[in-house]
Amino acid sequence: MTQIAITDARGRLASIIDEARDEPVYLTRRHRRVAAVVDADQLARLLEDAEELADIRAVDAAWEETRELGETPIPWEAVKRDLGLPL
């Protein structure tokens, strides 16, 4: 894990970007992390994974709410039939 002060980073942008291809480079101000330089492809994967995890958590929360309310889920086939969608 690489950390560099913002004041030092100003003159090393190209090398910081090269380092970030392998692992994140944290930028610090007064010895505290304030930002990170991350490989663009890695960031895209992280964002996709975060979105997928958010979807999974939403489904889990919906199932929990269904259980708490004592509701019976409506089968997907019934929903499609009611909406006139192809089965």
Image (cartoon, rainbow, N blue to C red):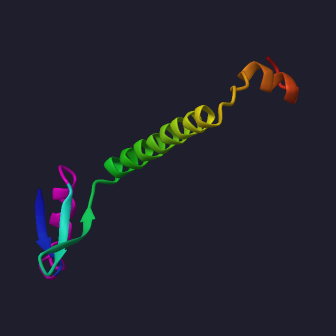
In terms of depth relative to the viewer, which is nearer, 2 or 53? 53
For residue 77, above or below residue 59:
above
Q: Which residues are magenta?
A: 7-23
Image coordinates of residue 71 in percent, x first then y, are: 69, 30
Q: Residue at x 22, y 52 (%)?
A: 21
Dominant secondary-structure state across the stretch colored magenta: helix
Image coordinates of residue 58 in percent, x first then y, are: 54, 42
Image coordinates of residue 67 in percent, x first then y, are: 59, 31
Was residue 60 drawn as part of the magenta stretch in this picture? no
Residue 64, image quadrant? top right
Q: Residue at x 79, y 26 (%)?
A: 79
Q: Give left or right: position of 7 versus 84.
A: left
Q: Residue at x 49, y 37 (%)?
A: 56
The quarter of the image holding the C terminus is top right
The quarter of the image holding the N terminus is bottom left
Was residue 8 drawn as part of the magenta stretch in this picture? yes
